Image (cartoon, grey):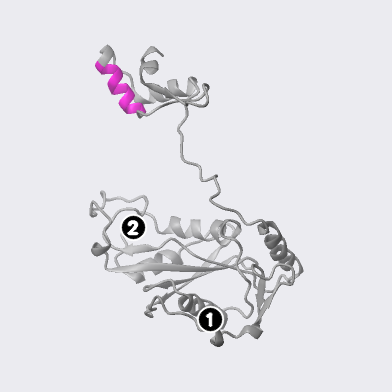
């Protein structure tokens, strides 16, 4: 305890809050240097826990802004879900984290029989041979995921083409997206895709497609994958006169956030 007292710091606003910037292994090494006694970093961890120290992580809980009618928006969406037939597709759409085709780090771990993979020590853009833009469409009722892997840019045209691919091949009704933190695709599809892709170097699009197609869960999740190598230029404005406004039905209570798109 006397050793920790030399290295701990405290909060200027709360006298009950203290922290130690060193890791358990570093504490064990410093303790040996000062006392000549060796202790394991595991023993240091247990000691810290007994003194009510814990591993502190950043918690993304401070809002950078909020919209006063967000609750109303979600209530409108949930009411639409409640009155919709169970046989009708309910779609959640979002774009998963973009990846690189490169011999680089950041792809997680997996169990293998050979040694570690050799990768570059930095993830620079110029070391990549391509981009992976996995746009996901998740059907709640069928527990089915559809992923269009883009290779260019996440533009409005790319998203429209991904929805058209799903529409023409698998469904017939479109459901507007939620606010991201409430979107079931974030919890029921993307984590399982991420798990299936861990520990592998992304060398080509077919490899990634094969990994994603193996995604499944005990609840019976199935995933359909498509590779879209069409090039989408960025910075192209949409002309208002080209929008088919008659197909967009705003909600009378909250038109700026809630709407329906007619087929």
Q: Residue at x 48, y 20 (%)?
A: 51
Based on the picture, tell me whether residue 28 belongs to the magenta stretch.
yes
Give the camera-side residue of 222 and 203.
203
Disc 2: which residue = 200
Q: Tell me the SS state at disc 2.
A: loop
Q: Tell me the SS state at disc 1.
A: helix
The answer to whether 192 appears left or right of 211 in the picture is: right
Give the camera-side residue of 113 and 178.
178
The segment highlighted magenta reads: 24-33
The answer to whether 110 appears left or right of 215 in the picture is: left
Disc 1: which residue = 164
Residue 10, image quadrant: top left
User: Which quadrant would the C terminus be assigned to in this image?
Assistant: bottom right
User: Which quadrant would the N terminus be assigned to in this image?
Assistant: top left
Residue 48, image quadrant: top left
Residue 146 location (% of width, % of height): 52, 71
In the rendered view, would you say 235 is above or below 214?
Answer: below
How many marks on residues? Answer: 2
CA–CA distance in space, label 1 to label 2: 30 Å
In the rendered view, would you say 139 is above or below 46?
Answer: below
Residue 87 location (% of width, % of height): 70, 73
Mark 1 or 2, nearer chain start = 1
Give the camera-side residue of 225 and 173.
173
Mark 1 Cα shell of 10 Å, populated few (<14), some (14-19), many (≥20): some
Mark 2 Cα shell of 10 Å, populated few (<14), some (14-19), many (≥20): some
Residue 258 location (% of width, % of height): 66, 69
Can residue 263 be seen from the camera position used here?
Answer: no
């Amino acid at each position: 305890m006397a050793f920790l007292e030399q290295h701990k710091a405290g909060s200027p606003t709360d006298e009950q809050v203290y922290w130690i910037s060193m890791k358990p292994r570093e504490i064990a090494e410093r303790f040996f240097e000062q006392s000549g006694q060796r202790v394991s970093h595991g023993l240091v961890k247990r000691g810290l826990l007994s003194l009510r120290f814990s591993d502190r992580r950043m918690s993304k809980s401070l809002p950078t802004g909020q919209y006063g009618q967000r609750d109303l928006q979600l209530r409108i969406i949930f009411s639409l879900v409640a009155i919709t037939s169970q046989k009708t597709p309910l779609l959640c759409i979002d774009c998963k984290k973009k990846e690189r085709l490169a011999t680089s780090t950041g792809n997680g771990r997996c169990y293998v029989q050979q040694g570690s993979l050799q990768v570059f020590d930095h993830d620079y853009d110029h070391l990549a041979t391509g981009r992976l833009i996995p746009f996901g469409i998740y059907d709640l009722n069928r527990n089915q995921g559809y992923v269009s892997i883009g290779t260019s840019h996440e533009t409005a045209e790319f998203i429209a083409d991904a929805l058209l691919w799903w529409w023409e091949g698998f469904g017939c009704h479109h459901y507007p997206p939620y606010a991201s933190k409430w979107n079931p695709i974030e919890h029921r599809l993307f984590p399982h895709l991420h798990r299936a892709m861990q520990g592998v170097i992304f060398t080509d699009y077919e490899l990634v497609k094969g990994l994603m197609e193996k995604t499944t869960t005990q609840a019976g999740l199935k995933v359909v994958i498509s590779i879209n190598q069409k090039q989408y230029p960025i910075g192209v404005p949409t002309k208002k006169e080209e929008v088919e406004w008659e197909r967009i039905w705003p909600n009378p209570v909250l038109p700026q956030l809630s709407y329906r798109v007619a087929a």
